[in-house]
């Protein structure tokens, strides 16, 4: 991860029983699916905002997602995990999807991509 690319989540499928091509396809399509989920109060997707910390693709195709919110008091806290689960579950070949919300490390605007900064005019 470079300094200018701090928004990238870790996509983990190390020592997977899945073929590398399938793991790569799943990872790419999961990230694309995550980019369709927007925080209802912010006009940028959750991936570019840096809210996704980790995507773990298991041997049985289950996917565990670790994410955060912009603030613990986020009004979208109840709906965002379900939106993430549904988006990732729509990827062909994905099994059961689990979403965990964490606040450590806390989210900061430093996690946003250049794309999100441009959309939000935060230069």
Image: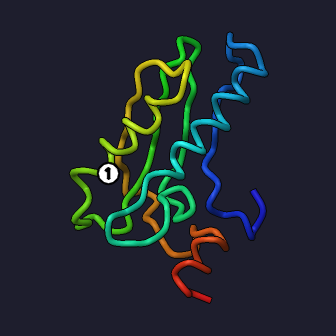
Rendered residue at 73%/29% (across/down): 24
- The quarter of the image holding the C terminus is bottom right
Q: Residue at point 55% right, 87% down?
A: 121
Residue 44, x across and y down, in percent: 49, 68
* Local crowd size for mark 1, using a 10 Å CA cut-off: few (<14), some (14–19), many (≥20): many
The x, y position of residue 86, in whole percent, is 37, 36
Seen in the image, is 82 located left or right of residue 2? left
In the image: residue 98, left or right of residue 118: left
Classify 98 as above or below 40.
Answer: above
72 displayed left or right of 26: left
Residue beneath the point at 78% across and 21% down: 21
Q: Quadrant of residue 23?
A: top right
Residue 70 placement (x, y as % from top left): 38, 67
Picture quarter with the N terminus: bottom right
Q: Residue at x 66, y 26 (%)?
A: 13
When the figure is inspected, residue 54 is found, relative to residue 69, above or below; the finding is above
Q: Position of residue 74 (x, y in %)?
A: 26, 66
| Residue at which label 1 appears | 80
Classify residue 2 by image quadrant: bottom right
Q: Total marks drawn?
A: 1
Secondary structure of residue under mark 1: helix
How was the colour assigned to the protein in this rendering? rainbow
Query: 43 or 105: which is nearer to us?
Result: 43
Q: Is residue 41 above or below residue 93?
A: below
């Amino acid at each position: 991860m470079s300094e200018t690319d701090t928004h990238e989540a870790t996509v983990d499928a190390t020592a997977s029983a899945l073929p590398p091509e399938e793991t790569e396809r799943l990872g790419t399509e999961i990230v694309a699916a995550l980019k369709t989920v927007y925080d209802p109060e912010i006009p940028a997707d959750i991936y570019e905002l840096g809210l996704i910390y980790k995507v773990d693709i298991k041997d049985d195709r289950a996917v565990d997602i670790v994410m955060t919110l912009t603030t613990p008091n986020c009004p979208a806290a109840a709906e965002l995990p379900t939106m993430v689960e549904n988006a990732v579950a729509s990827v062909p070949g994905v099994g059961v999807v689990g979403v965990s919300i964490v606040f450590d490390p806390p989210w900061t605007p430093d996690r946003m991509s250049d794309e999100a900064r441009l959309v939000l005019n935060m230069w």
